[in-house]
Image (spheres, rainbow, N blue to C red):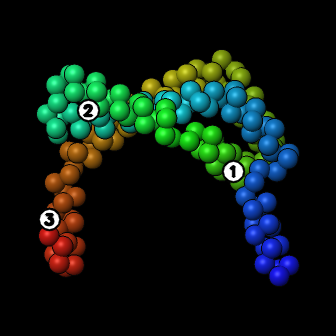
């Protein structure tokens, strides 16, 4: 019985940031303005709304309404605290406390701050570039997928 209780406890503690890393990760996320970065991630999703607007042939009022639905979903349904806690685990696995301190030092510099300020917009523009390229190559993708669909008896 004890063995069954100990293993989950050990595994759960391995996934948590160590005490030595927890404070630097909190400081890093503060310096990074992680909430603002996450909002930038939302803004990077906006091209999806443009695609949906075109697909559904919505006018500007319909597009604004659709955008508001997405914004409400993001603000009310997405658990950003959960996301941040999961990201803290990732950072604790990827970086030592010393490395986190160096990253924090960089982000506190003027160029580090500029990087943080421009990152959300760059993410949005990068997502648009990626979506445009993917759309332009969609026919080629379907040419590659078609034999698979036929092989498995899947009809489009």
- Considering depth in this image, is 13 or 72 the residue closer to the camera? 72
Q: Which residue is mark 3?
A: 156
Distance from Cα at disc 3 to Cα at disc 1 = 41 Å
- Considering depth in this image, is 101 or 78 the residue closer to the camera? 78
Label 3 element class: loop
Q: Residues within 10 Å of mark 3 (few under 14, many from 20)?
A: few
88 relative to 39, above or below: below
Label 1 element class: helix
Mark number for residue 41?
Answer: none
Q: Say if residue 41 shows up in the picture.
A: no
Q: Residue furthest top?
A: 110
For this view, does 5 lie left or right of residue 150?
Answer: right
For this view, does 63 lie left or right of residue 91?
Answer: left
Residue 108 x, y percent position in the rendering? 71, 23
| Residue at screen point 21% across, 33% down | 53
- The quadrant holding residue 57 is top left
| Residue at screen point 28% across, 27% down | 65
Q: Residues within 10 Å of mark 2 (few under 14, many from 20)?
A: some
Distance from Cα at disc 2 to Cα at disc 1 = 34 Å
Q: Which residue is mark 1?
A: 89
154 relative to 69, above or below: below
Residue 60 x, y percent position in the rendering? 20, 22
| Residue at screen point 41% across, 30% down | 71
Q: Which residue is mark 2?
A: 50
For this view, does 85 lie left or right of residue 38?
Answer: right
Residue 103 x, y percent position in the rendering? 71, 35
- Considering depth in this image, is 3 or 13 the residue closer to the camera? 3
- The quadrant holding residue 124 is top left
Label 3 vs 1, first from the N-terminus:
1
Distance from Cα at disc 2 to Cα at disc 3 = 25 Å
- Find out whether the residues at labels 2 and 1 contact each other: C-beta distance under 8 Å: no
């Amino acid at each position: 019985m004890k063995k069954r209780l100990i293993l989950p406890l050990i595994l759960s503690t391995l996934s948590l940031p160590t005490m030595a890393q927890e404070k630097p990760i909190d400081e890093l996320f503060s310096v990074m303005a992680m909430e603002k970065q996450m909002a930038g991630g939302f803004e990077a999703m906006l091209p999806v709304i443009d695609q949906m607007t075109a697909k559904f042939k919505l006018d500007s009022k319909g597009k604004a309404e659709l955008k508001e639905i997405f914004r409400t979903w993001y603000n009310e349904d997405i658990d950003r605290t959960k996301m941040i806690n999961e990201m803290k685990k990732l950072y604790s696995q990827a970086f030592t406390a010393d490395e986190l301190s160096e990253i924090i030092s960089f982000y506190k510099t003027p160029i580090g701050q500029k990087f943080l300020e421009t990152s959300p917009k760059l993410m949005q523009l990068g997502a648009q570039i990626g979506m445009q390229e993917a759309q332009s190559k969609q026919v080629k993708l379907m040419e590659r997928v078609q034999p698979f669909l036929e092989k498995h008896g899947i009809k489009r």
